[in-house]
Amino acid sequence: MIVLGIILLVAGYLLPLPLLVTIGWILLVIGIILFILGAVGRPVGGRKVWF
């Protein structure tokens, strides 16, 4: 999700589409929050470990 957010941010800045920039920031923030929750050992999505 973090990578998709970065890709959308770059595409939004290269193309004149502010909607892509907004969606990119939202995905980036959600991805970082989920990454931090998973790193501290909190179950994310009902699973503690993703294989």
Image (spheres, helix red, strand yellow):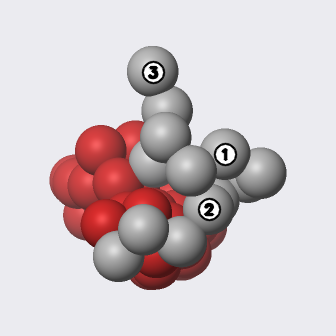
Pointers 2 and 3 in contact (C-beta within 8 Å): no
Residue 46 point in image, percent of width and height: 77, 51
Residue 37, above or below 8: below
Question: Does 39 sit left or right of 31 as displayed?
Answer: left
Question: Does 3 sit left or right of 38 as displayed?
Answer: left
Pointers 2 and 1 in contact (C-beta within 8 Å): yes
Q: Which mark is residue 47?
A: 1
Mark 2 to mark 3: distance in Å?
Answer: 13 Å
Where does label 3 land, which residue?
Answer: 51
Quadrant containing the C terminus in the rendered view: top left
Mark 1 to mark 3: distance in Å?
Answer: 10 Å
The secondary structure type at the circle numbered 1 is loop
Question: Does 20 sit left or right of 46 as displayed?
Answer: left
Where does label 2 land, which residue?
Answer: 43
Residue located 42% across and 68% down the image:
41
Which of 46/33 is in front?
A: 46
Which of 19/3 is in front?
A: 3
**Which mark sits nearer the N-terminus, 2 or 3?**
2
The secondary structure type at the circle numbered 3 is loop
How many residues crowd around disc 3 within 10 Å: few (fewer than 14), some, or many (20 or more)?
few
Which of 47/19 is in front?
A: 47
Task: Residue type at mark 1: give it.
Answer: Arg
Task: Residue type at mark 3: give it.
Answer: Phe
Residue 14 point in image, percent of width and height: 22, 53
Pointers 1 and 3 in contact (C-beta within 8 Å): no
Q: Can residue 45 be seen in this snapshot?
A: yes
The secondary structure type at the circle numbered 2 is loop
Residue 46, above or below 19: above
Residue ranking furthest to the right: 46
